[in-house]
Image: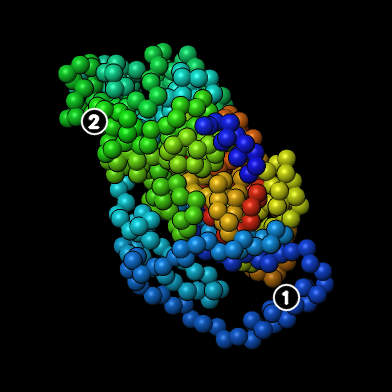
């Protein structure tokens, strides 16, 4: 945190891996460095719980307005304590039309809001949209990219109203790049335009050995805080109108309303940092302190209000004027894996024990400051099952919701980091019949961008064992782990989208 503070002064002046338990809240095991006395007490408590009567499942339906959260975060736990409460999962579309609270036999609590934090309805994108962008980076003013996403619900073939394709233009009216007629953008797939003069993320991994190079390029700088729009033609001039516009994003300082939606995102102080604005795919507006499932279900949001739809992240957690949160740009092109939450099951590594217990979740108290793990690590293990109907040759996970820097007291500051394969002993059905050893594969925090402070919002973690040469067959599975460094203890959340290629 001191590192962040010093950098900020210098600058101036949702695995939630349920993984398909839709983000249920888990009570963390109270692992500590205590001696035999604590173990004895734990055994006594266990015996008492066994004698307690089993309570049948209970569901109470209430309105979202009746769900009350504490106005202040709980006091921070001792430095050696595990995070108190965790929410893990792969977002799925909300299955309820109003908020619910359900109590289970295990004592777990699930809050399933159907709207954004505050109760308003979610609006999932349903057309071609600008899904991520930046107009400056570590290489300076021309370190730019504009990512287009197909959110129509089906593959989209580019057919321009006039000209040779769809045009991406800045608010000066000049076309920066075009998406040529005949281009097929897969459902939930992306098309990437980059400024070839300064673009610094060409080595960010895309699909099966390819990288996130531009599908199209341009060389004319887009000024800081200027608006950008996608049109159904590339003839420019009078053809660039509201009626011909697919989408737009611009800042509050952009005067031309054709090139922004709503009042625009907060204008940035122009630092040459590794940042991006990406479209909200959780539904909490990038809030570090808002818990519960992702109301957006992992889908990108389009409420026609840039300020609500886009989230600012950078690799240093910089306060540049549009909110402050640790994260990373993640440009995607036509070769990149696609969000496929509905086509995968993400299960506990060992379904014979509780989700908060080893080997499903392991709390290591070993301090490792150089790896952003001052208070140790959380190691989350899951079994990912391919239900796509075919082979999967590329598998990664994108962080859509997490507690991270700058987390207030009582909220955990987690930093996704690269992990290696480990051999783990599991008890699988029929439970109690014996144990076996399985290899749990590590995941890699994908770079560039360089993430010296660890991962955060929009960071991606790949399962490197899945390749063209070693695909996952339909119905087959792979055991993976997510290693999270802990820079501050407290309540935590970790939700990811599953991204894959056939």
Tell me the number on the disc at residue 482: none
Q: Label 1: few (<14), some or many (≥20) within 10 Å?
A: few
> Looking at the image, which residue is at 69% across and 78% down?
46
Of the two numbered discs 1 and 2 in the rendering, the one whose residue sits closer to the viewer: 2
Viewer-nearest residue: 9 or 455: 9
Q: Residue at x 40, y 16 (%)?
A: 221
Residue positioned 41% across, 47% down in the render: 285
Quadrant of residue 363 within the rendered picture? bottom right
Residue 381 at least partly seen: no
Instruction: Measure how far apart labels 1 and 2 are at the Cα level.
Output: 62 Å
Count of numbered labels shown in the rendering = 2
In the rendered image, residue 54, in percent from the top left (x then y), is placed at: 55, 83
Local secondary structure at mark 2: helix
* Rendered image quadrant of residue 469: top right
- Residue 240 can be seen, yes or no: yes
Position of 302 relative to 291 (above/below): above
Q: Residue furthest front?
A: 13
Left/right of residue 74 with respect to residue 291 in the rendered view: right
Compare residues 445 and 493 and report the one nearer the observer: 493
Percent coordinates x, y for residue 104 in the rendering: 50, 74
The correct choice, above or below, for 35 with respect to 340 in the image is below
Counting from the top left corner in percent of width and height, residue 365 is at: 74, 55
Image coordinates for residue 381, horizontal then vertical, percent: 63, 53
Say whether disc 1 or disc 2 marks the residue closer to the N-terminus: 1
| Circle number at residue 42 | 1
Give the quarter of the figure containing the N terminus: top right
The single residue placed furthest to the right in the displayed view is: 36
Residue 257, which numbered label? 2
> What kind of element bears circle 1?
helix
């Amino acid at each position: 945190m001191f590192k962040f503070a010093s950098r900020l002064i210098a600058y101036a002046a949702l695995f939630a891996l349920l993984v398909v338990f839709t983000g249920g809240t888990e009570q963390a095991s109270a692992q500590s460095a205590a001696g035999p006395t604590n173990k004895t007490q734990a055994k006594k408590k266990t015996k008492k719980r066994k004698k307690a009567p089993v309570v049948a499942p209970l569901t109470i339906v209430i309105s979202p307005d009746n769900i009350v959260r504490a106005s202040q975060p709980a006091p921070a736990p001792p430095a050696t304590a595990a995070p108190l409460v965790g929410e893990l999962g792969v977002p799925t579309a909300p299955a309820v039309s109003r908020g619910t609270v359900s109590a289970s036999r295990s004592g777990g609590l699930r809050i399933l809001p159907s709207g954004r934090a505050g109760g308003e309805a979610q609006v999932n994108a349903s057309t071609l949209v600008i899904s991520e962008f930046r107009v400056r980076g570590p290489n300076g003013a021309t370190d730019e990219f504009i990512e287009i996403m197909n959110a129509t619900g089906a593959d989209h073939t580019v057919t321009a109203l006039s000209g040779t394709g769809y045009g991406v233009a800045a608010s000066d009216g000049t076309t920066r790049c075009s998406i040529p007629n005949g281009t097929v953008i897969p459902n939930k797939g992306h098309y990437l335009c980059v400024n070839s003069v300064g673009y610094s993320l060409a080595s960010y991994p895309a699909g099966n050995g390819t990288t996130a190079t531009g599908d199209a390029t341009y060389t004319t700088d887009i000024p800081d805080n200027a608006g950008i729009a996608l049109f159904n033609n590339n003839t420019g001039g009078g053809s660039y109108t509201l009626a011909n516009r697919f989408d737009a994003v611009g800042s509050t300082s952009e005067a031309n309303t054709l090139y922004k939606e709503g009042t625009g995102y907060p204008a940035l102080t122009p630092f040459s940092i590794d940042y991006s604005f990406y479209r909200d795919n959780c539904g909490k507006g990038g809030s570090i302190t808002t818990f519960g499932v992702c109301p957006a279900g992992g889908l990108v949001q389009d409420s026609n209000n840039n300020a609500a739809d886009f989230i600012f992240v950078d690799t240093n957690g910089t306060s540049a004027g549009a909110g402050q949160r640790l994260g990373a740009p993640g440009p995607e092109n036509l070769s990149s894996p696609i969000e496929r939450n509905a086509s995968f099951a993400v299960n506990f590594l060992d379904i014979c024990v509780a989700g908060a217990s080893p080997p499903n979740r392991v709390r290591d108290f070993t301090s490792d400051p150089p790896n952003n793990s001052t208070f140790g690590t959380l190691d989350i293990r899951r079994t990912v099952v391919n239900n796509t109907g075919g082979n999967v040759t590329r598998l990664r996970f994108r962080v859509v919701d997490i507690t991270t820097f700058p987390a207030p007291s009582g909220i955990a500051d987690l930093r996704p980091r690269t992990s290696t394969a480990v051999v783990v002993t599991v008890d699988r059905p029929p439970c109690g019949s014996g144990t076996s050893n399985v290899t749990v594969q590590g995941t890699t925090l994908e770079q560039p961008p360089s993430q010296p402070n660890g991962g955060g919002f929009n960071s991606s973690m790949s399962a490197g064992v899945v390749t063209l040469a070693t695909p996952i067959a339909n119905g087959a599975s792979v055991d993976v782990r997510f290693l999270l460094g802990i820079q501050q203890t407290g309540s935590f959340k970790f939700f990811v989208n599953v991204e894959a290629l056939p």
